[in-house]
Image (cartoon, coloured by chain):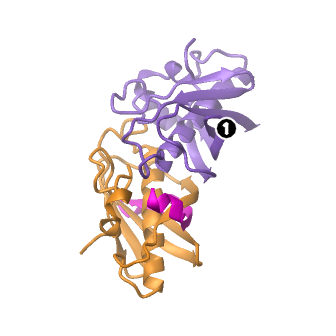
Chain colours: A orange, B purple
Amino acid sequence: MKAFQDYYSEDLSHCYGCGRLNEHGLQIKSYWDGEESVVKFLPNERYIAIPGFVYGGLLASLIDCHSTGTAAAAKYRAEGREMDTLPALRYVTASLKVDFLAPTPMGVELELRGKVIELKEKKVIVESKVLADNKICATGLVVAVRMPETMLKK
Amino acid sequence: MKAFQDYYSEDLSHCYGCGRLNEHGLQIKSYWDGEESVVKFLPNERYIAIPGFVYGGLLASLIDCHSTGTAAAAKYRAEGREMDTLPALRYVTASLKVDFLAPTPMGVELELRGKVIELKEKKVIVESKVLADNKICATGLVVAVRMPETMLKK
């Protein structure tokens, strides 16, 4: 099964968070699980906040890329199209909000679950949660907007 | 002049964003500039979103660590104490909001400027902006809370 990010064109696959061609990046992979989108991710030990806990900026990054990926996948789905069909639908983040509810333990595979709460022509809002050992550690809210043609063509 | 982060104790200096002992991390350095706090940072090329532009998750990380550092520095200053005096005041992020206003160009030294907009006993709110070539690319709002003693001692 291909991840949302596997459909991104080569020039859009260098992102530190989700680009499959960024060898130093996080290379997250998002999939549908019914109405929710899911990423599983085991943080490398460099991404610590204080010993034993995951860095909040990493969680923000995971939420960011998972949400823009979910936005694209949701819009394709709403249009009844596969993610490799044209015109390409890619999203950038207009705003990102993360609430850190509990320290996130290191050494545990994290699960991010996203849910589209608003889908308009050029804007998708995605709500998400980060779970460690089935406990919610953080929640996210991302407003994703269609990538301008000028950026797509760059 | 020592940066805010240079005052952090060794066990709190492994953070990916601001720990001076995290050799893989960003190692940001924040300083006062009058009533504002400032970080200058030139992103490594791995932190790209799409070619030519900086990754939003990196900006979120810079805002996050600069704001918690600013929170600590502001509270010490309010108490008329140096940052290396006890009891130690360290902050964690309760919530982080980033608005991305314009694509942030790569290859430019970024300037983050933070400002304390609320300072209470256990909570500090820091507003910030990210500038590239003197243009605001993103703004941040961080609610920082005093690190619980249980985490400080871990």
Q: Is residue B88 above or below residue A150?
A: above
Which quadrant of the rendered structure holds the C terminus of chain A?
bottom left
Q: Is residue A17 above or below residue B33?
A: below
* Residue A9: image location, x then y, percent: 34, 64
Crowding near pointer 1: few (<14 within 10 Å), some, many (20+)?
Answer: few
Which quadrant of the rendered structure holds the N terminus of chain A?
bottom left
The secondary structure that most of the magenta stretch takes on is strand
The residue shown at (53%, 54%) is A101
Region of the chain picked out in magenta, as a range: A129-154
Which residue is nearer to you in this view: A87 or A98?
Answer: A87
Look at mark 1 in the image and give the residue it sits on: B122
* Residue B117: image location, x then y, percent: 75, 39
Residue A147 seen: no
Q: Is residue A90 left or right of residue A51?
A: right
* Residue B92: image location, x then y, percent: 55, 39
* Residue B101: image location, x then y, percent: 63, 52
Q: Residue furthest top?
A: B1
Q: Residue furthest bottom?
A: A80
Residue A48 seen: yes
Q: SS class of the residue under badge 1?
A: loop
Q: Amino acid at mark 1?
A: Lys
To which chain does the residue with label 1 belong?
B
The residue shown at (48%, 78%) is A75
